[in-house]
Image: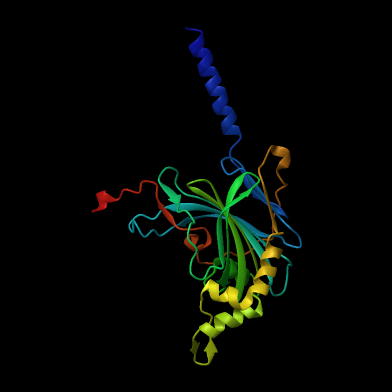
Amino acid sequence: MSLRIPLLLALLTALMATSACTPARTGASAQSFYSTGVTDIRIDVAPPLTLAASGRQWVSVPNEMLITLQPFTEFSFAAYAADTTGPLTQTAHTIISSLPRNSWRFSPESWKSPDSLYLSSDNIINGTRWTIQMRPVISQGDWFSELWQQNSRQTPVLWLAKRWSSNPVDDTRIVAEYREAAPQCVSDAMLAEGMETKGVATLRPISGVLLWARCRADLDAFSARADNIFTMQSITNSASLPGISTPSALTLPANKPNVRKLVGEVEPQDRDTSYLR
């Protein structure tokens, strides 16, 4: 017995040392974004899209249930564009966001918003469950649009976006979103429902059902193109990791990313809030 205890301690020490030497890694390359560890994901992005910016921030997330408590999430992103100059008509971005473990989680994405065009939460891709959504995104107030604008890139007033999201664990969410300048049919429909102030028409979110009825051909064509942008796969070994690229240094927006819009709602792990009453 006296020999077994020191041997067990030695094995545990070696295991801890090995784990300490192989921490989770997150990185981006010209055509890929990856994260090891619990996320275990590699997302390849099809050309002509190529890496333009990547980074990591800590961002607070307002919460409606516990107003006084706002968790911080690690927001790691990569942004891809089809060209390096001129107006943008085609972009993509990937995000991995992690909340404090055992305290907060991302709320399930079970219900689509009224302006959402599509939501399906039961899609298995390479053994991982993904939620797929499609929706229009107004550039004003959108953090990724501000990122491009901050670096002298013109963005459309309205995007059409298709988004894949997955939760390897409750406190971590992975997002991959592809965008194109919205077809004229979609823009016209939202302008028709908007308001005019001092002669300037403004876009207004409208029913996704109405957009499908007016613009089905354009929406179907966009959705088919979006399906060819991302390839998701697990990381089997170090050989499957892409080389890390250093994108051009872009200036980040002064505003922090809106995690609730870009990643999702959050809620406490313990749903019992009776102690607050």
Residue 131's x, y, as percent? Answer: 56, 55
Q: Residue at x 49, y 86 (%)?
A: 195
Picture quadrant of residue 176: bottom right
Identify which residue, 45 or 183, lies in the foreground: 183
Q: Is residue 227 above or below residue 156?
A: above
Residue at x-position 55% and y-position 19%: 11
Q: What residue lies at 55% left-to-right and 80% top-to-bottom?
A: 190
Q: Nearer the viewer, residue 221 or 176?
A: 221
Residue 115 x %, y %: 51, 71
Direction from residue 108 to residue 27 in the image, left or right: right
User: How many marks can you see?
Assistant: 0
Q: Position of residue 208 (x, y in %)?
A: 54, 72
Against 169, residue 158 (above or below) is below
User: Is 20 located above or below residue 96 in the figure?
Assistant: above
Quadrant assignment for the C terminus: bottom left
Query: In this orientation, does residue 67 appear?
Result: yes
Residue sitting at x 70%, y 38%: 238
